[in-house]
Image (cartoon, rainbow, N blue to C red):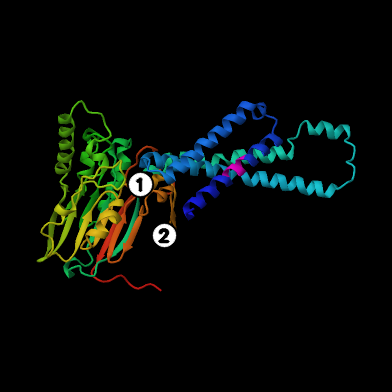
């Protein structure tokens, strides 16, 4: 039995025991009729079984990444609900145990008529604590609502220094901006979207990368937003790549010709905005006679649901003489699967795709999201030998129309022509 298997089994057993304890405590403290109905018990345990089955499938089988992400998000949301309720149940049980120990074998004092009358007015302490616990379980749900109301357009700038020992001196100190996963079909507030673009432009980046998923399915989603993103400009250019949603693979098409035309419309949208779309190709970026390579591939995802349109052999063509190569590749799973083992000449890769699942915790010192159980690299800067990967958690949103803890990101890099400083 592997360590992962043992952990998952322990989690499952712990959840079953916790749910049995919660159910028993609710029945003991509350007189609600439905709690004592046998059908409620059956529904409760069937739902619990479905949740645990989903957990096992997500961990041990290669189900669709979207389905896995949905299961894990529901799992951790319900786990948060349990964690909000359990302390109140524990406090109530400890309180009752202390009362029982104090009483010992002494006979209880007779209840007076006044005490009996008050007992019909006041809420028993056990009932009060349990109801307070149930009220506390609304905190995670309120968090999701808050994420819809405020988090979804709360753009944040992430600043990162990118150390590249072979970077030509003329590029030292250059400012690079990155945005990813716009998903224009999900937007509903043009003013807020414009505010994020203006935030990026105020940083005055020398060049900008966009790492895929301009739309959810159709190029027509950009109709109301093309003018906004046309303002994304940089002196050394805006370079873009395609994501898994940019091919129309998740939409229904009457025939292949219609799908092909739609995809060409999306490609033309990049051109109309003045973005240089890299499709398994590269550009030589020159500053005062010195050059670096900007490479971009079409989507390449490790998981079976995501297409492998990317061709690294084409993207690296005629770049051997360039001292630094920067790669735009939408899906971060591509980095460990193909870039690191087969293309050591790639100095830094820029990705998106994960959205950080739009749910989790992210600070300078710590980050966590359920998406880390799907993608090893899901947010921020990663190193493997001399190679680096940065994963942007996205400008837009998909599915859940909000963000909790993992806020929409605009990344600003400063390129440094030196090795990374040694940390102790």
User: Which quarter of the image is occupied by the C terminus?
Assistant: bottom left
Per the image, the residue denoted by label 1 is: 355
Contact between labelled residues 1 and 2, with CB atoms less than 8 Å apart: no
Query: Residue 144 in magenta?
Result: no
| Vertical order, 104 against 253 (above or below) | below
Q: Can residue 201 be seen?
A: yes
- The spot of residue 179 in percent (x, y) is 28, 50
Query: Residue 17 in magenta?
Result: yes
- The spot of residue 31 in percent (x, y) is 70, 30
Q: Quadrant of residue 176?
A: bottom left
Residue appearing at x 61%, y 28% in the figure? 40
Describe the element under mark 2 as helix, strand or loop. loop
Per the image, the residue denoted by label 2 is: 364
- Closer to the eye: label 2 or 1: 1
First reached walking from the N terminus: tag 2 or tag 1: 1
**Boundaries of the magenta span:** 15-19
Front residue of this view, candidates 71 and 291 = 71
Q: Whole-Å distance between the Cαs marked 2 and 1?
A: 18 Å
Mark 1 is surrounded, within 10 Å at the Cα level, by few (under 14), some (14 to 19) or many (20 or more) other residues, namely many
Residue appearing at x 44%, y 61% in the figure? 365
The secondary structure that dominates the magenta segment is helix
């Amino acid at each position: 039995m592997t360590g992962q298997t043992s952990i998952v089994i322990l989690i499952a057993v712990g959840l079953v025991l916790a749910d049995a304890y919660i159910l028993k405590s609710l029945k003991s403290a509350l007189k609600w009729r439905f709690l004592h109905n046998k059908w409620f018990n059956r529904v409760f345990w069937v739902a619990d079984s479905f949740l645990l089955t989903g957990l096992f499938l997500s961990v041990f089988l290669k189900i669709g990444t979207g389905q896995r992400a949905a299961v894990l998000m529901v799992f951790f949301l319900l786990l948060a609900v349990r964690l909000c309720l359990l302390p109140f149940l524990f406090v109530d049980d400890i309180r009752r145990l202390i009362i029982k120990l104090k009483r010992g074998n002494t006979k209880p004092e007779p209840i007076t008529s006044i005490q009996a009358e008050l007992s019909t007015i006041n809420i028993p302490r056990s009932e009060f604590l349990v109801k307070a616990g149930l009220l506390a379980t609304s905190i995670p749900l309120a968090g999701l609502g808050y994420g819809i109301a405020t988090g979804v357009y709360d753009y944040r700038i992430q600043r990162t220094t990118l150390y590249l020992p072979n970077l030509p001196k003329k590029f030292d100190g250059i400012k690079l901006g990155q945005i990813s996963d716009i998903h224009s079909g999900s937007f509903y507030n043009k003013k807020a979207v414009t505010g994020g673009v203006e935030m990026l432009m105020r940083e005055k980046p020398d060049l900008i990368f966009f790492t895929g998923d301009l739309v959810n399915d159709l190029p027509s989603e950009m109709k109301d937003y093309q003018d906004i993103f046309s303002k994304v400009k940089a002196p050394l250019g805006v370079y873009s790549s395609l994501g898994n949603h940019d091919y129309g693979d998740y939409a229904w098409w009457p025939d292949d010709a219609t799908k092909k035309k739609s995809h060409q419309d999306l490609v033309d949208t990049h051109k109309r905005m003045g973005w240089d779309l890299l499709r398994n190709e590269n550009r030589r970026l020159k500053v005062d006679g010195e050059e670096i390579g900007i490479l971009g591939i079409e989507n390449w995802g490790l998981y079976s649901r995501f297409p492998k349109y990317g061709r690294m052999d084409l993207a690296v063509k005629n770049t051997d003489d360039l001292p630094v190569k920067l790669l735009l590749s939408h899906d971060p799973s591509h980095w460990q699967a193909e870039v690191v083992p087969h293309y050591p000449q790639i100095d830094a890769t820029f990705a998106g795709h994960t959205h950080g699942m739009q749910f989790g915790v992210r600070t300078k010192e710590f980050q966590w999201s359920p998406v880390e159980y799907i993608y090893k690299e899901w947010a921020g800067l990663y190193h493997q030998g001399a190679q680096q990967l940065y994963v942007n958690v996205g400008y837009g949103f998909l599915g859940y129309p909000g963000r909790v803890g993992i806020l929409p990101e605009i990344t600003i890099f400063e390129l440094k022509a030196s090795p990374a400083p040694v940390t102790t």
